[in-house]
Image (cartoon, rainbow, N blue to C red):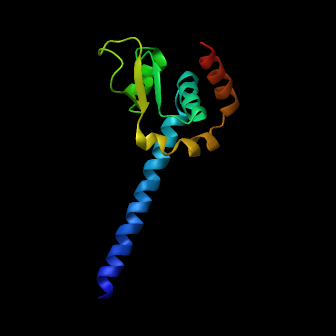
């Protein structure tokens, strides 16, 4: 009777450890992004939204899409549209608060994000 309970706890412990590893890997990936890409993510974080209407072909957006951080959303024109919705993936959105709290260049990124919103 004790063995199934211990097995359940071991499985729970392993799942939590794997979740922490995945979270750290995403934060490490976000920390290695160019400042322009980080500015887009900070803009989304500051607006408390996961979707943005922008040009998915811009260099920062292409980097974010290639790395699997953002994806083209539904609607907003044809596949080659210059202005359509892009969304941050849910697994990345979940760690945004943690990433912002540990980002060493957050002041620079916020300044760049302000320039992004002025365009």
Left or right: where does residue 111 sit relative to residue 59? right
Q: How many marks?
A: 0
Left or right: where does residue 100 sit relative to residue 93? right
Location of the N terminus (image quadrant): bottom left
Q: Position of residue 111 (x, y in %)?
A: 68, 23
Image quadrant where residue 74 sits: top left
Residue drawn at (66%, 33%) of the image:
106
Residue drawn at (29%, 80%) of the image:
4
Left or right: where does residue 68 sit relative to residue 106? left
Q: Position of residue 8 (x, y in %)?
A: 34, 74
Instruction: Say which of 18 and 74 sits in front.
Output: 74
Image quadrant where residue 89 sits: top left
Left or right: where does residue 115 sit relative to residue 17? right
Task: Give the vertical position of 24 relative to 9 (above or below).
Answer: above
Q: From this viewpoint, which residue is outermost toward the bottom?
A: 1
Instruction: Say which of 74 and 70 sits in front.
Output: 74
């Amino acid at each position: 009777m004790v063995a199934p309970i211990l097995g359940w706890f071991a499985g729970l412990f392993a799942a939590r450890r794997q979740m922490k590893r995945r979270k750290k890997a995403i934060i490490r990936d976000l920390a290695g992004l160019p400042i322009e890409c980080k500015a887009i993510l900070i803009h989304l974080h500051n607006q408390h939204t996961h979707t943005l209407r922008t040009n998915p072909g811009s260099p920062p957006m292409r980097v974010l899409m290639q790395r699997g951080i953002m994806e083209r959303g539904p609607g907003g024109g044809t596949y080659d549209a210059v202005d359509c919705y892009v969304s941050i993936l849910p697994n990345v959105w979940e760690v945004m608060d943690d990433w912002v709290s540990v980002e060493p260049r957050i002041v620079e990124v916020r300044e760049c994000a302000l320039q992004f919103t002025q365009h």
